[in-house]
Amino acid sequence: MEKGFSLIELFKLGGPFMWVLLAFSVATISIVIERCIYLAWHDCEVASIRDKIKSFLQEGKKHEAEEFLASCTHKQTVASVLLALLQNAKYGENRMERAAEAEAQERLRRMENGFNYLTSLSSLAPLTGFLGTVSGMIGAFQSIAVATDVNAQLVAGGIYEALITTVFGLIIAIVALVAYNLLIQKVDKFAAETSKAINDLVPELIES
């Protein structure tokens, strides 16, 4: 029974491009962990705060609604969006909607910070892996060209480099893509619920 390779051995067999892939893997894991912590720490719940503000407005307590939103912690993300909506209500429907949308865009920008790096890594990692593949195959064929007696062991090193870098590059790309899609779903849900909350509260502010 053949002895398997350890990760360190595979890393060495993968050639110089494995160092680039290692940097990509560290960057991917770091971004995913940081974004997960950020989104978990920030409260993205919208419905409960929207309903409370709507209740205040129906009772004619706009000032109390503003005080409630101002007292919300920074982690309650939607509070600042709805506060911008209420504070600009006196300037008319168009102005308050634009103010709320601008604040919502800023909040979404902060939530999506780092997502562009994940998409870039999901593209660069497999390309780097394929570059390692080409490099390995070049080395393998070079060995064949200069050898007088060709055998499997002669070209094994180049083939290992070709296959290992491809596999590692694809693994990094898959992790980055899966993480991106899971995280963007949470952000998109928040964006949709925030937009609905703004649309629900605008009529109440116009009537008040």
Image: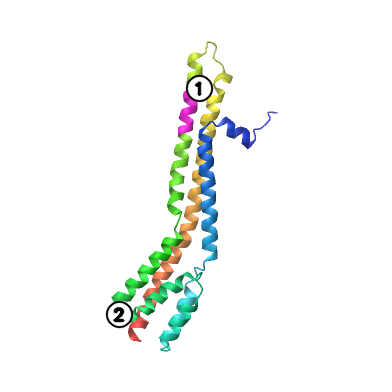
Q: Residue furthest right?
A: 1
In this rendering, the answer to whether 140 lies above or below 16 is above
Decide: few, some or many residues near mark 2? Use Cα within 10 Å; few <14, some 14-19, many ≥20.
few
In this rendering, the answer to whether 200 lies above or below 189 is below
Where does the image place residue 66, in percent across and percent down from the top left? 43, 81
Residue picked out by circle 1: 140
Residue drawn at (48%, 49%), measured in percent from left and top?
177
Question: Is the N terminus in the top left, top right, bottom left or bottom right quadrant?
Answer: top right
Residue drawn at (53%, 56%), measured in percent from left and top?
34
Q: Amino acid at mark 2?
A: Tyr
Labelled disc at residue 91:
2
Question: Is the C terminus in the top left, top right, bottom left or bottom right quadrant?
Answer: bottom left
Q: Give the colour scheme shown.
A: rainbow
Q: Earlier in the sequence, mark 1 or mark 2?
A: 2
Q: Left or right of 102: which side holds 2?
A: right
How far is disc 1 from disc 2 in space, using C-alphas?
72 Å
Q: Amino acid at mark 1?
A: Ala
Please provide the residue range marked out in magenta.
131-140
Choose between 17 and 45: the one closer to the eye.
17
Give the tally of numbered discs: 2
Labelled disc at residue 61:
none
Q: Answer with the quarter of the image where residue 60 lies.
A: bottom left
Q: Any magenta on residue 135?
A: yes
Decide: few, some or many residues near mark 1? Use Cα within 10 Å; few <14, some 14-19, many ≥20.
many
Name the element at disc 1.
Answer: helix
Residue drawn at (47%, 74%), measured in percent from left and top?
47
